[in-house]
Amino acid sequence: MSSDGSRDELVAAVLLATRKVGSQAALFSQAVAERLGLAGTDVECLDVLLVEGGLTVGRLAELTGLTTGSATRMVDRLEQAGFVRRVPDPADRRRVMVEPVAGLEAKLGALHASIRRTQIDAIGHYNDDQLRLFLEYLDSAAAILLAEAVKMRAPSEEPGAGGNFAARLGGVTAGHLVFVSGAPNIVLRGEAGLEELYKAHFDGPVPRMRVRDGVVTVAYTRFNWFDWRAQIADQNVELSAHWRKDRGEIALNTAVPWSVELRGGASRLSASLRSVRLESFEMRGGANRVNLELPQPVGVVPIRITGGMSRLQITRPSGVAAGLQVHGGIAEVTVDGETFKGRGQISLQTPGAPDSLNRYEIEVNGGVAKLSISTY
């Protein structure tokens, strides 16, 4: 029997050799991918399909360690390139299966023929019992790698010191910021040159934050302080007024376009998005005070607010056209210096809006006390 020291060294050597095999396998897979004009993960996906047969996108994601969104985009690429096809599941035609096209196995087999022959020669001198041991270890190693890949891609929920959050940019090409349970006193801004997808800091209540496929979710607990209201002499009082020092600030990477969504309303929101490429902004659940600074639009960008509003101020770049729809009653609305009071609803457009390819379409449902739309 080997001594403990020798065994530790042997285990370390086996783990190192396993890493080397994994690295070289990844390099070989990348070489095959380059021959086919694909990404390395695309080739791994094809291998899984050839072994397993037809799979749903969800099951393919499980077997490759990818998120469902990433697996869907990968299948889109492979289908467009003519390597896979989507077909109805014969057992349940409501489901869609992904399967390799005819001839794919022969095509990949030709690229793997040389390495297969060499591998057969390399293991040819081992007996059956030794090969069974190899197989047992390799099956275990494959399962471990898959589980660790899933864990590595799993979103982090724990803040750093002082309520700080951040997520790496990676291959994200678009961001979607979602407040799933309302927002208290929040500041949003764009930051050029940011290495991360976003970074955030919270003083006071710290939410849970998750990131997956560019979707950043912010979730406060259901009964945080800003959810509570008091009613005195028929007047609603925001208890959050007593917590001015409690604030969250989120910086968004301006290298990717963003859509912003707030579900459950907001107490106070200051969004300075002049440097962000904004694809959409939506707030549901009403708000107390909101200041929204918009960037130059690319295309028709919707701004939708539902649930009533106390004070809303929107500024846009000079010369940018906008349309406005307000339903549910208006106390006072000022658009580029023109004021409207006491109306049930309003529909208007700034000069040039109908013909402008790049403009904002602003819709407010549920009434508004004071709304200002101007330019900077």
Image: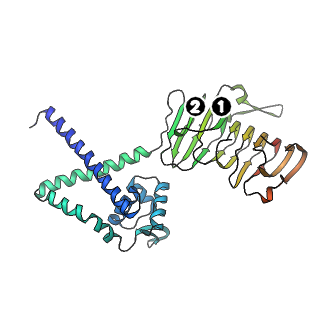
Judging by the rendered image, the residue that carries numbered circle 2 is 201
Asked whether 336 or 133 is in front, the reply is 336
Q: Is residue 132 visible?
A: yes
Q: Could you give the CA–CA distance between mark 2 and mark 1, rounded to whole angstroms?
A: 18 Å
Residue 170 appears at what percent x and percent y?
A: 48, 45
Q: Amino acid at mark 1?
A: Trp
Q: Which mark is residue 215?
A: none
> Based on the displayed image, in which of its 4 quarters is residue 266 positioned?
top right
Q: Amino acid at mark 2?
A: His
Sooner in the amino-acid sequence: mark 2 or mark 1 = 2
Q: Residue at x 46, y 62 (%)?
A: 75
Q: Is residue 42 above or below residue 304?
A: below
Judging by the rendered image, the residue that carries numbered circle 1 is 225
Q: In the visual, does 143 lie left or right of 331?
A: left
Q: Is residue 66 above or below residue 222?
A: below
Residue 185 appears at what percent x and percent y?
A: 67, 33
Q: Is residue 206 visible?
A: no
Q: In the visual, does 58 lie left or right of 111?
A: right
Query: Is the C terminus in the top left, top right, bottom left or bottom right quadrant?
Result: top right
Q: Residue at x 18, y 35 (%)?
A: 8
- Secondary structure beneath disc 1? helix
Image colouring: rainbow
